[in-house]
Each structure stands twice: as C-alpha cells, then as structure tokens.
Image (cartoon, rainbow, N blue to C red):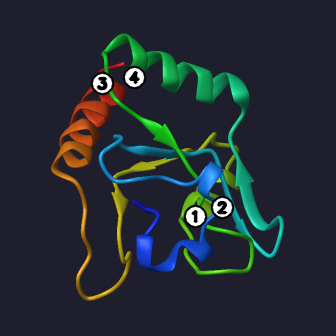
Amino acid sequence: VNGAVNPTFQEVHEKQNASYLGRGPCLTKFTGHRGKVGASDANAEYVAEVVRLFNDAGILWQTGELGKIDEGGGGTVAKHLAVYGMDVIDCGPPLLAMHSPYELSSKLDIYECYRAFNVFFAA
C-alpha cells in the first residue's frame, strides 16, 4: 500500500510525486528515510518490464512516493529484500489515513491491484 494524498493533510506529500485514490495501484520504485538512509531502488529495466506488463494488460496504474522527506512516515520491507540483490518495487492500492484505525481506499484501486498481481505472477 501507499499513502494517498489526503485533502486534510496535503502538506506531508509532494503532490507531483504522490498517489491518489481512483487512479489504480501505486508503483513505488524507491523508498527510504532522511534522504537515502535505508533506501532501496529498483533498476530502470525492471521497472520498464513491470510497466510493460501492466500496460499490455490495460491496467490503470500510477507512481508515487511515501511522502515528503522527513514529513509523515511510512516504510516498507523493500530494503530488507533488496540486500539479497533483488529488484524490488512496492505495488499496492493507495490509502487515505494509512496505518490509522480507519483506512480508506478506492474500489477501483483494489480491483486494478488484483488484476496487476495476476498479470505479474502469470509472467
């Protein structure tokens, strides 16, 4: 999952590099905190292959970051897998109020995410 831009708390996102509800699953190529501390970054060729799979299947998708550096929060297991030499991309539906007691997502994002996972695992 990825944190979608919340209209109430827009300041924690870089809106040009953020995910939004209703635009499909979010691909996050790199993650980390405090600049590049604990970061992982997938190779461009791997990202292109995943994007090609999604585009060929007509899947609606978007890219986004977890938020502005040092604002908000969030993290993934990507860095723990990347230490083994894997290319890792986070992919999941954007959520409003991620990790809160009441998260909100879009039905379209959930369905497109389901389709994206099926295409990826079938490849």
In front of the other: label 3 or label 4?
4
Disc 3 from disc 4: Cα separation: 7 Å
Q: Amino acid at mark 2?
A: Glu
Q: List the residue tagged with mark 1.
A: 66
In front of the other: label 2 or label 4?
2
Crowd rating for badge 4 (residues with CA inside 10 Å; few <14, some 14–19, many 20+): some
Q: Position of residue 66 (x, y in %)?
A: 58, 64
Which quarter of the image is occupied by the N terminus? bottom left
Compared to residue 105, the image places residue 29 above or below, namely above
Asked whether 37 or 104 is in front, the reply is: 104
Q: List the residue tagged with mark 4.
A: 54
Q: Amino acid at mark 4?
A: Phe
Compared to residue 44, the image places residue 34 above or below, namely below
SS under mark 2: loop
In front of the other: label 1 or label 2?
2
Q: Earlier in the sequence, mark 3 or mark 4?
A: 4
Compared to residue 100, the image places residue 62 above or below, namely above
Q: Earlier in the sequence, mark 2 or mark 3?
A: 2
Q: Which of the numbered marks, if any, corresponds to residue 117?
A: none
Q: Earlier in the sequence, mark 1 or mark 4?
A: 4
Disc 1 from disc 3: Cα separation: 24 Å
Q: Residue at x 54, y 64 (%)?
A: 77
Q: Amino acid at mark 1?
A: Leu
Q: Which of the numbered marks, if any, corresponds to residue 119?
A: 3
Q: Residue at x 22, y 48 (%)?
A: 110
Q: List the residue tagged with mark 2.
A: 14
